[in-house]
Each structure stands twice: as C-alpha cells, then as structure tokens.
Image (cartoon, coloured by chain):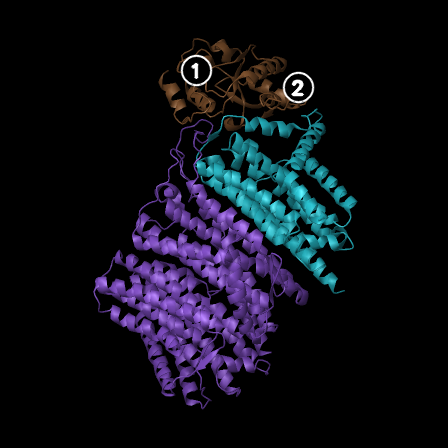
Amino acid sequence: MKLNTFRKKSPWILHYNAGGCNGCDIEILACLAPKYDIERFGMINSGNPKQSDVLLVTGPVTKRSRERLVEVYAQMPEPKVVISCGACACTGGVFRGMYNCEGGIDQYIPVDVYVCGCATRPEQIIDGVIQGLSILEKKTKELEQSVRLKNEPVKEGTQLNRRNIAAEIIKTS
Amino acid sequence: MKEVLIPVLLILLAPAIGCLVYGFERIVKARMQRRIGPPLLQPFYDFLKLAEKRSMIVHSTHAFLGIMHFVALWFALAVLLFGGDLILVIFLHLLSTSLLILAAYSTRSIFSHLGANRTVISILCYEPVLILIAVAVYMLTGSFDAASIFNGSEPLLFRMPAAFVALLMILPIKLKKSPFDVAEAHQELTGGVELEFSGVFFAAIYAAKWVDYVFCYTLVYLFGASDPLLGIGLMAFVFLYLNALDNSSARVNYKQMLRFSFVVALPVAFINLLLTILGLHL
Amino acid sequence: MYPFITSLFIVPVAVSALLLILPKGLSRLLIITTSVILSGISLYLFMTITNPLHFGVPHFMDGVVSVADIVLLFYFGSVAIRRKSWLVGVLTILQLGAVSWLLTMKHAGSELQFTVDKLSVFMFLLINVISGIIAIFSIQYIDSEDCSAFRKKYFLSLLLWFIAVMNLIVSSDNMEYFFLFFELTTLASFLFIGFRKDAESSKNALTALWMNQIGGLAILVAIFFISINGYGAATFSNLLVHSSAPGIMLPLALFCIAALVKGAQIPFSKWLLGAMVAPTPVSALLHSSTMVKIAPFIILRLSPALKGTTVASVVIALTAFVFVAAAIGALSQDNFKRILAHSTIALLALMIMMAAVGTPVTAVACLTLIFFHGLSKCMLFLNAGVLERVFHFKQSSDMDRLGETGPFTSLVISVGFMSLLLPPFGAFIGKWFSIESMGALATHQKILGALVIVAIACGGAILSLLYFKVLGSLIARRGASDDIKFEKTKPLYYDTLCILMGMIFLGVLGFPLLLTHFFAPIASQTLSMPIAVTTVGWKLHIGAMTLPVIPMMIAFLLLPVTFIAAMFVRFGNVDRAKEYACGEKIDYSFSSLYFPTDKASPYFSLIGIAFFVILIVVSVF
C-alpha cells in the first residue's frame, strides 16, 4: 500500500480567518459538531500549522492579516492543500475593491479548491475538503510558490530555510 | 522463559497496543457526544501520514530531545513491565517528561514555554501521590518491585482501596485529560509542549502519548495483579471513568489543580499510607 | 600514615602564610600545586586507611587550645563592641564563662585527641579535592574583584587556612578541640562574608556570627554536662561508649543543635541565605560543599548513640519539615545564589535526616548525598561566579539569552541541576535510597515514618519545580542557525568546571564500585555494624536495598549523554521553520515562574523554634 493513501485518511485541518466577518468560521466549526461530524473522516482541527495538512482560509485578506496568513502557510509542511472557503476568500466577496482588502487569497498563496458561498454551508465545505483530499493524494513534497513569487518549486530532498519565505513573499507584493 | 517472553512481547508491542487504546478512546468519546467518530485504526493512519510529510524543525536540539523523550518513556515502560523498582519507574517517567520539558524550553516559542511551565506544575501535582502509593505497596508486599505484587494472595485493590481512589484522582493530571489538562490546553496554548514538533518528529511525540497510555493502564492493572480478570475489569472501568470525566468537565486553572492535588489527592494517599501502616500491626 | 595526615593539617597553613608574601605569578603556581598535592594525599589516605587511627598530641597542646579559645572569644567580643551588637556580646560572654568554667573544673583529659577513621578520610577527600578546585577557580575570580592587591592575597590565604581548619575538624575526637575548630569555621564564615565590606555584607556577617555562636555554645554546654556527670573524657568515642547511660541524651541533643545550626536548618537558616553576598568561591566552599557538611558529619559520628532515641525522632521530624519548607521558600526567590542556598538547606535536611535514622541503608544514602551534592553544588556555585563575572548578572530572570550567548555555561548549569534531581545521578540515588529506607522506618515508628515519607515526596517534587523554574529561561535558543559556538571564558573557569563535570559523570558510571568498595565500608564502620553487599545477577544488594545497575546505566545514556549530544546533533537536510506564534512577529523575553511563598517564612520560623524547644525538653526528660 502506498503511503500516499494515508494522507487521505488523516487530514488535519488548520482554520485561519484572514479578516473575515466570522460567518464562514462558524460554518466551519459546525462541521466538527455532531450533526456534520468530519472527525469520522479522521479530520481534527489542530490549531497548529506545523501539524496540519489542510488550510481552510476564510475572509478577504486584509493588509494586517496577509503577513500572518503567509507566515502560517509557510509553517505548514508539504504536502498540503489550501481551500478558500467563502466568497471573500475566493475573490474578495462583498469587500472586493475596498482600500484595505486584496482580492482573495490566491494573490499570496496557491489555492487548490475554491468553495463558494456567503456564508458557505457545511455540506459545501465538506465537499470541498473531500475534493481537496483527492488533490492532496497526488501532491508531492515539493514546495509550491505563490503566484507572486513565480520561482521554481523546491525539490523534495533539499533543505529549505522557511524562516524567510514569508518575508520574501510579502516583499514581492 | 515464559516470564521473560511476555514482558518482552508487551514491551515491543507497546506502541501498537497504545495505538488501539487511543483509537478506541476516540470512538468512545465521539459516541458519548452522539457522533460517529473515526475508525479504530485512525491513530495508525495519523502516524503513517505524519511520517510521510516533509520534515520541518525549529532546531536540532529541540527535535532530538523530542525523539529521546519517546525513547525514554518506552524505556520507563520496559522497566515497569519487567517488574522493576516502582520508585525508579516513577523517576524514569519523570526523566522522560523532563526531556520533553527541556525540549520545549529550548525554543524561543511562547506556547512551548507556557506549556512547559504548566507541565512542570502538573508534575508537582501527581508525583508525590505516586510515590506515596508506591510506598504503600512496599508496606503491603515488603518490596518496592512491581514483580512482588504478583505474588500476593489478595489483589491490592482490596488491601488498599484508598490508594486506588488517589490514583483515580491523579490519572487525569498525568494523561492530560479534563478537568486537569492545563498543560495541553488546546484552546489556550495550541498544544503547549508539542507545538513545535512536525512531521516525523511529531509522530514520535504522538507515539509517546500511546506509550503513556499503556504505562498508566499498567499502573491500574497492578491494582488487580494476581487476578487477571480483575485487572482487566479495572482497566475497563478506568477507561470509561477517564473518558466520562474528560467529556463532561471543564478545564480548571493551574492554581485550582494544585489546590485539588494537595488538599484532596495527597491527603487521600496519606490516609491510605497511615491505614496500611496501622493495619499491618493490628 | 601519620606524616600524611599531619601534612594535611600543616601544609595548608604554611601555604596560607606564604601566599601573603609571594607575588601573583608564584602564588598561582603554589595554589595549583598545593591543590594537586592535597588531593593526592587525601586520595591516597582514602584508599589505604581501613582501621581507625587514633593518635594524640603532646599535652601542652591542650593548653594551647584553651588559650586559642580565649583569644578567639576576645576577638568576637571586640567585634561585638565595635559593631554594637548585643547578641554577639551576650553569646560571647556566655561562651567565655563556659570556657573558663571548664578550665577551672578538673576533668579528665584524653590521651588521643585525634581519630582518623573511614568517615574522616571520606571527608578529607571531599574537602581537599573540592577546596583545591575552588582555590584554583578563585585565583581567577578574585583577580577581577574590586579591591586592593593585598586583600586579594588575604582572600586566597584565608581560603587555604580554612582548608586546614576543615581537615582538623573532621579528625578531632576531643570535644574541646572540636569546639575550637568549630568556632574557627565560624570565624572563617564571619571574615569571608564580610569580605566586601559593604553595609549588607557586614550585617550578614554579624548574623552568621551570632547564629553559629549558638552552635558553639551548645557544644560547650554539652562538654560541661559530660564532664559533670563523670562520663570520663569529653571525646566522641567516649560518648559512643556511654551511649546508654542515663542523662546522655542532653549532650547528644546539644550536639544535634550545634549540627542543625551549622547546617542552617530553620529557624537558623537566615545566616546561610545572607551569606550569599560573599564572593562566590566562599559560597561554593563554605556554604555548600564543605563547611555545612559538618552537620551531617556530626550526626553520622553520633548515630550509633542516636539511633532509635526520641531525640533522633525529633531531629527527623524537624529535618523533614525543613526539607519541604526550604523548597517552598525557594520558589519565591529570583537571585540565583539564593535559590541554590535554599536547595542546599533542603538537601542538608535530607542528609541530617538520613544520618539520624542510622540504619545501614540510610547511612549509605547520607554518604552518597554528601559526596554528590558537594560536587554538584560546587559546580553550580562556580557557575554562579562565572555568571557574575563574565555575564554580569545575578538574577535568574535575567538569564533569558544565556542559551545563545553562553551555551557552555548554560549546559553546565543544566547538567548541574539535573544531577541533583534525576536518575542516574548520585543525588537522585541518595533521594531514592532515602524514600525506600523511610519505608523501613515507618514499620517501627508509624506516624513519624508516614509523615516523613510525605515530606520527602512533596519536597522532592517542589525541588524539581524549582530546578525547572531556573532551567526554563536558561536553554532557550533561537533556531536561526544550528551552530552552537561555545563561548570563550577564562581557562581557569573553564577547566575547573570541566573537571567537576567529569567527576560527576565518573561518579555516576563508577557508582556500583563506589558503593561496594567505599560507601558501604564507611557506613558500616561508622555505624559499627556489618553491611552485606552482594551482587545477584545484574542487581546490587546493599543491606535491604537493591540497586538495579543496568537500568541506571541506560538512564545515564538517556539523560546526560542525550542532553549533551542534543547540543551536537545536526539533522541535515531538514527544513528549518520559525516558532509558531499565530503569525505574529514580536520578539519576546522569557522569565521564570514565581510563587509568592515568602509570606510563609515567619510561620516556618515559628514551627522551627517550636521543634528546637521540643528537642531540648525531650532530651532532658
């Protein structure tokens, strides 16, 4: 049995709010509750990027939260998927064009699944996560870069100093 | 030959047994919350997934001490299963926890430091009680070795029931379960000491948690040692008790935990010791 | 044999006189050679002496001792007058009265004033080796002290003179000689603590003086009672011979009081805590490794007489209480040396307790604790000196960046603290033996045994909290680079610390050997009972206690080797990430835990005083 299949069986979630209104956050937390119960898929809400595989981001990226978003993303080990939940995370949603928001998180980090809705329903979130898991299974341990950096992906066996990645990504923005 | 084979088998399979116990615990916890819960082998899947991630560490000292924490805890369990001196076992467990605490202190991470501070305080809460229980065992069996418990006629549970009550009081502190999980307060400290570990290094810490389960349940088994059925029954009872308590109680802060340990748990263990000593001469 | 023993007395005094006049380079060389010579002699004596050697000095030395007593007491009187301290004055007058009364009373003298048995050579080894190392350390330390060149020479010569006094005190059998040397150590304390001549030092020196004088007075009253009741000569061997005579309890209790005062047990702990203002080699030498070890030494000498008596029970109860109280009191301290002082008081209480119980296992535990605690505390205090001189701070909450700026120092401090706490180190083994042997005590004296076990368990756990409190701020490193560059300190600092650490590790590795060939025979000779040491399979049986050797050796690999290896292990080819702080970019400073336990100290003192009163009352009736 290839070890890749175990990624699908035990995805640990990190949920990050990049400046949103908390509507999608509440829906995400409802997924963990008894009614929708995503723990039956082995998902736990770990609060710690170093131990999670799936990054669920809500909210449009405000100027304050973008550094922290990238920092959290950089501290997650590969292979990982990013799922942007809600219209704000996908495209900026209701706040698109405002002075303090960028237009969605894919300006900074590579997104794998876009889940629409304002707020997204738990069923859509679970659907999105399941789709993300099948993408996760195919991923390698290379480090992907965001749209802005446009560098070569960092190969599996090389050592990388991740302490500076976040600063680099922000610098080029 | 047989008395070496069983402990060796148990020691080698300890992480696997702990994995099954931990998985079963997650199912029981989910069912208590009227959910379905993960499959039984979920911790095993977690472990394999973690082993397969791209590794990431803060610095080598931290990662190395984390791995050695797992090794030391496994070794403490090995000494216990071979019937070693109970006080030595308690202090070897302290040694392994110290390695984890040192690992947590060695990074400049606030959550790690806070978690380590709180872990040190929880050591203060459960260690005196364990030592008092071990001394009470010595009073009854004449030796500190765990092996001598198996030679007694009556199970320890009936000869010193108060010690079992004291053990029940401190097991939540040791296993970091509500209401005494200040050390690993997930909502406050995002994991405390385990925070900066990732990938295969976190797999070691995760496996150490399983071994800790086996350790604590072995301590419970010792209370029903000469009668295997009673021992297994006690383990099942403690399992249900711990999970019911975990699911139904809120977290207390560290001062309340200290107060509970020194005002309730320690006097119970002390009364047990006194009764054992006085009972020997009646 | 005799020339070696007397050289241990005379060489330090001669060197001390020479140091006052020699120039700096020569005196350095002299100190190093003297340390090596003294250590060599004491090691040789340790290996070769098996039966106790009794020897005497010409009778006129009795007169010299009495004259020295009176001169010393007049000096104390002058201090009392100069500093206007009525406590010192009153105590000096009482002591002068007692001494003159003893002079006028016709009491039997003793022929053999000195006894060198296994316990004495054990103390010789400890004293000379540790003092040698501290003397070498203080060459560098006192060089950077802010005082005149003559005062620096004075410090070093006083240190060497003190070694001679310590050698004399552990080999004297005659109680009057013992009193003289006891008061000479008090004088040494007084002079050393007041060395820096500022207001706080002078105040603390006076406190040390009058508290230790109480101990001296207790010794004099004990001699008085022994002479009055006609037990013969006032010597320790005589006391042990008459151990079941009526009325012997009072002198025994008085000696216990002297030991408890010298060991800074509550309520007499203030002098040791105040002594921390002295230069660090003083704290290392007097107040942790050698002088305060006189306390368990006295009790060990007297333990055949003390065993099982009510006086012993009161001493055990008192020291059990002090073990917990000192540990609790330490939790509110921030000054690094004060934390070490509190921990010393607590461990001394444990040693005195072990000696007072007097069974074979506890005697071995006491010796183990004396030896390894001496080594570990010496290393920790010398480190405190390095912190003071090289890094310029004294509070443990300032230690935040030490893991980065001074990795070697933080490594040594961590190893030092762990060596007091965890297996497989010696101090842990002493604690382990004590817990196990208290189980045996509890079968005879039920309530006392149970309370003592609770005290040891709680005190041990609180001490571990204390050590982690300091360790916490000490080893934190940024992960920016994996490389650890050990800082360059002065060679004398570095070398002495390495020697001490090496000795601790050797002691751990060779512990079964030490136990069977040295500690057990010493204990059995002191207690005058045979101790069976057998090896069954991989376990070592000593009396009623079993030491599993293999787990201890594996624990050695798991703890100190792991910790030191952790500094050198490199996981190449693995990503380095930042610490998680929810993405924030603030830089933090770390401090240590604090518990407001100093509010309890007055209550502790009251309880201590109550215990002392009970001790006297119990011994009289």
Q: Residue at x 38, y 67 (%)?
A: C40
Mark 1, residue position: A146
Image x and y of residue C176, in percent:
43, 81
Q: Which badge, 2 or 1, is on the more N-terminal residue?
A: 2
Shown in cyan, the chain is: B
Q: Residue at x 47, y 89 (%)?
A: C108
Q: Position of residue B260 (x, y in %)?
A: 62, 46
Type of amino acid at the residue the image marks with label 1: Ser
- Chain in brown in the render: A
User: As displayed, is residue B257 above or below residue A145?
Assistant: below
Residue C187, image x, y percentages: 36, 71
**Callout 2 amino acid:** Tyr
The foreground one among B147 and A168 is B147
Pointer 2 residue: A36
Label 2 crowding class (10 Å Cα cut-off): few <14, some 14-19, many 20+? some
Disc 1 chain ID:
A
| B219 w.r.t. C232: above or below | above
Q: Is residue C95 above or below residue A35?
A: below
Helix, strand or loop under label 1: loop
